Image (cartoon, rainbow, N blue to C red):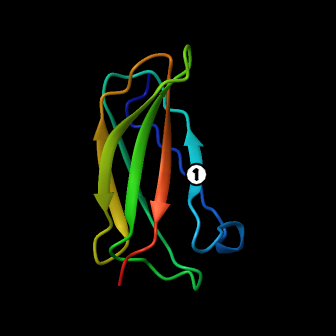
Amino acid sequence: MNCFKKASFMISGAKLHSCRENHFNIQLERQNFQIINGTVYNQNQEPCPGAAVQVIQINCKDHTRNLLGYVLTDENGHYLFPIEAKPYMKYELAVYAPLL
């Protein structure tokens, strides 16, 4: 398994709905530790500082959901969230616009 393998995706602002939650499902490779990181952009394709990114773990067997936590984007719209990736789990991200 290549520990340096990297994958990314980009979502057009036209696909996001303002004033609503936008959910994205990401499947991670089987490893004990993963870092979820990325950049949040506003509708003008500019980095979005102060946005909240929520991470939820979903059990594929019984569909129970476990909130892992939140992280705020920095002044450049970047976020980073370390997790202990577990087999038979999916991870869902929800992005919330900044309050100000």
Relative image position of residue 21 (x, y in whole percent): 56, 60
Relative image position of residue 47 (x, y in whole percent): 43, 78
Residue drawn at x 35%, y 77% as measured from the top left? 49
Q: Is residue 8 left or right of residue 75?
A: right
Relative to the observer, which residue lies in front, 9 or 83? 83
Relative image position of residue 57 (x, y in whole percent): 43, 32
Relative to the observer, which residue lies in front, 6 or 99? 99
Q: Which residue is mark 1?
A: 23
Relative to the observer, which residue lies in front, 2 or 82? 82
Relative image position of residue 58 (x, y in whole percent): 49, 29
Q: Is residue 83 left or right of residue 56?
A: left
Asked which secondary structure carries label 1, the reply is strand
Q: Is residue 32 left or right of residue 26?
A: left
Residue 68, above or below 17: above
Residue drawn at x 40%, y 45% as measured from the top left? 55
Residue type at mark 1: give it: His
